[in-house]
Image (spheres, rainbow, N blue to C red):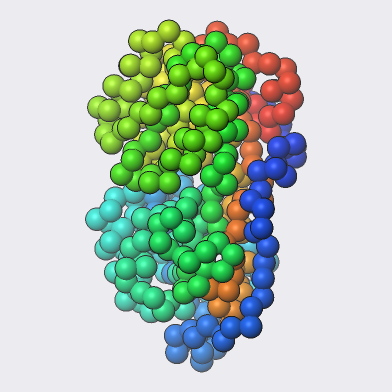
Amino acid sequence: MRVELSRTIVRRHPWEPRMRRRGFVEIVCCAPAWSLPASAQQRSTVRHIGVFLGLATGPEDPGASEVLRPLKASMEEAGWTEGRNLRLDIRFGGGDLGKINVAADELVALSPELIYATGLPPVQALRQRTRTVPIVFSLVADPVGFGLISSLSRPGGNITGFVVWDLSIGGKWMQLLQEIAPGLRRIGVMYNPDTAPYAPPLIASARSSAARNIAVVECHTRNDREIEAAASSLAGEASGGLLIIPEPFTNANRDRIIAQCERFRLPALNPVFGAASRGALISYTYDFNAMMRQPASYINRILRGESPGNLPVQAPTKYVLSVNLKVARGLSLNVPPALLGLADQVIE
């Protein structure tokens, strides 16, 4: 379903300061300088980095430009311009593990000075292939839990980057869904346990914020059939709703999930990027453009000689609350004025 954006309200969100992870402060350690490949040490005029986009299918995919545009702009601000002193080799995963593994092989074989990767599967694939090429990631939820780094404050090794949120954000998601749809009595939490092992703390946080008269159930979904079955089951219950956990499976199936929520008239909070604009009722997630600009700072610092192991993993600097009034009207929901006043984006 295509939804036209006719009104957008942007303001600093009052919850934003509380959503930042405490302790994400940059540190400078007296460790030996990171040993870059020989090509980096030669300080050639044109520096060579790889870019690995996990979900984009190719250069024509709109998702690719959504990542590359702010990244390149931020890199230019740091003094790096493609075609002048920077060479980019870009590969695409398309959300397919087979393609991701092939792309990882290709990038490592090119011997770049650094690789920037979006999403967990590409970073995992790269880590299996190199422990020497510096890797900067974004759009990863739990890098410690997945064994990518030693700790958030001091990653160690060749990997660092930017997480998508504090795992306590599940409580905010649950609060918002109850506020926009106060009649809910049963809320399903949808995710694929095979691709989101970090889900338990998010679910625990959501449960802690659920009203006592609301049953919270886990909806494990691994394919289209299970997405439809979960939505149908919740619709069969009185006052059912849905909270989607953003992870590789639900990210790749964003539009299918939105379509099933529309089909079964389920109020849903979907924090997957772009969900509200595509027809989800409400979303609360990181500001994508700001998130895509952040990695340039670490890429710049590593190209200038710093060690990725000494650069602490950072959280988003801005969150965005989006409300789709057209969807709310279709569900016969009256959005509280106070909630609209807090929204950064209102879609009518």
> In this picture, is 340 found above or below 147?
above
Q: Is residue 321 visible?
A: yes
Q: Considering only vertical position in the picture, is 277 above or below 150?
A: above
Q: Residue at x 51, y 91 (%)?
A: 42
Q: Position of residue 135 (x, y in %)?
A: 46, 69
> In x, y percent, where is residue 248?
38, 45
Indicate whether 179 appears above or below 117: above
Q: Position of residue 152 (x, y in %)?
A: 55, 61
What residue lies at 38% left-to-right and 10% top-to-bottom? 237
* Residue 56 placement, left or right of 326: left
Q: Residue at x 27, y 63 (%)?
A: 102
Left or right: 304, with 94 as reference point: right
- Identify which residue, 304 or 233, lies in the foreground: 233
223 or 22, nearer to the observer? 22
Say which quadrant the N terminus sits in.
Answer: top left
Whether residue 89 is situated above or below residue 304 in the rendered picture = above
Q: Quadrant of the C terminus?
A: top right
Q: In the rendered picture of this protein, how many numbered marks are placed on residues?
A: 0
Q: Is residue 325 visible?
A: no
Instruction: Point out residue 229 in the picture as x, y percentages from the top left corner.
Output: 29, 21
Most foreground residue, 89 or 322: 322
Quarter of the figure with residue 307:
bottom right
